[in-house]
Amino acid sequence: MTFTYWKDAGATIALNTPAAATSGTYYIKGASAEGCFTIKPVVVTINSAPVVTIANPEAVCTPSTVNLTTNGVTAGSSPGLAYTYWTDSGATVPLGTPSAVTSGTYYIKGTSSLGCYTIQPVIARVNPIPVPVIEGKANPCIGETEIYMTEANRTGYEWMVNGGGQVTAGGSPTDSTITIHWNAGGTHTLSVNYSNGSNCRGTSATVKNIVVTDNPAAAGAIQGSDIVCAGAQGLVYTVPPVANATSYAWNVPSSVATIVSGEGTSSITLNFAADALSGTISVSGAGCVNGQASTQQIDVAQKPDPAGSISGEHTFSKGTTGAVYTVDPIANATNYNWSLPAGASIVAGANTDSITVDFGPAASAGVMTVYGSNVATCPNGTTSPDFALDIPGESYSIYPVPSNGIFTISLTFPTESTFNVNIYNNLGLLLRTIYNAKTVGGIYKEQINLTGEDGHFYFIEFINPAIPMHKVLKMEIIN
């Protein structure tokens, strides 16, 4: 059987698109191989597709989800439709949970009772909850005024300062900034919350810890040498810990010294140049501001010059007192260090350029020296040349011999001594006695005048039985 398709019952007007006919009455002609045929009418009815109207649901905030199955989403659609939900526009991949979707574009298929359907997209929006961010100084100093800010163009700002500060500007429900004057030290908090453009509000306020630093306390006394020697190296200066200081600000003039280690700490090490000058160093605790400084004057000394030659008597007797010895002033010396033989002692002028020495009964000959010094860190100056100190031997003399009646008697003795001097004529008659004659520095000298005496020869007697001392000399006088 062969079928053909026509628009009329007489099969005279052909239907050109029988596979895509619209509504109406058409005719089908069935013909056999023998040429016999029959024509029958066919009625085609094409129903209209249903109307599916979509109203995108209201946006929600995380963690909520969107329900696509509510009546409001498809309100205005053809009545009596059955709805199914899909993830693709061809409605080939079903949507598992249309009543709890997240953000995205989905598809709703509305099917009529006649099996006709329409597919329409629907948009679900799940907006994020905002997490406010606070920008601004977390470690302000007491007395500072700081501006803090969060995201702009939001609504319902809620600022809160938990102690330590006074709000001086901003901070209202419409302000994305707040200005705070910090007036108390310690740890405080600043918080903010708001709603974003999707009317979602933060789950909780963002909290920023604020540590307000107090100003450093006054620095204590600097510990270290206040008198140093030029060229000294590695001298340490410290200051006790300063409350609220985060570092230490040292001021050391370059003309005085150079900091070689410890800058910024409570202990520094200084090197002093050979040409360093005296001056003042200081330190303060550093933090928000520098605290009150502590100062120390450092006097820089130079190494003493070499000592010159010593002046004074080279000879002494045991028991000599009040012997004076001097040296020229030594540049850069504050101390004079004398060295004496055993048995000699400084009785006046110690540590100066002029000393008074007593020689004890056990004093011995030797050398005297002196050198200059100043502070402990300075090397000592060069020692003076040795100054010899000798004890005289026992000797007696008169001169000139012969004389004209005027002559000198002289005595040296190893011990300071007191004695008598007797003068006799050639007959042994005592003419004169000098009582309690005394050596000075072991030496005794006296001029004798016998010009009024008669005679030619005289005898001079030195005597002190207690020492013992006894010596007789002969003098010839020529008139």
Image (tube, rainbow, N blue to C red):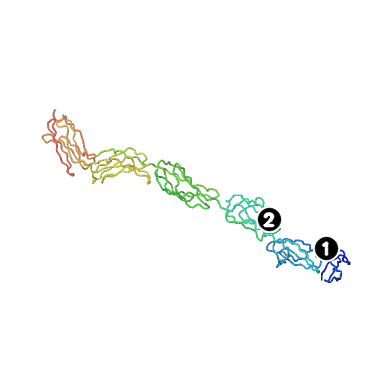
Quarter of the image with the N terminus is bottom right
User: At which x and y percent is residue 10?
Assistant: 89, 66
Instruction: Answer left or right for 214 relative to 153.
Output: left
Q: Position of residue 479 (x, y in %)?
A: 14, 28
What distance separates the C-alpha of mark 2 from that of mark 1? Answer: 72 Å
Q: Amino acid at mark 2?
A: Tyr
Q: Secondary structure at mark 1?
A: loop
Mark 2 vs mark 1: give the one in front: 1
454 in relation to 72, above or below? above
Task: Looking at this view, name the residue that lies furthest to the left.
Answer: 427
Depth order, front residue of 442/217: 217
Marking on residue 31: none
Question: In this view of the protein, which residue sits in the foreground, 367 or 208?
Answer: 208
Question: Three-letter amino acid code at disc 1?
Answer: Asn
Q: Secondary structure at mark 2?
A: strand
Left or right: 166 as drawn, with respect to 450: right
User: Quick one: 17 or 101, which is closer to the camera?
Assistant: 17
Neighbour tally class for label 2: few under 14, some 14-19, many 20 plus, Cα within 10 Å? many
| Depth check, front residue: 158 or 387 | 158
Q: Which residue is mark 2?
A: 157
Q: In the rendering, which numbered label is found on residue 16?
A: 1
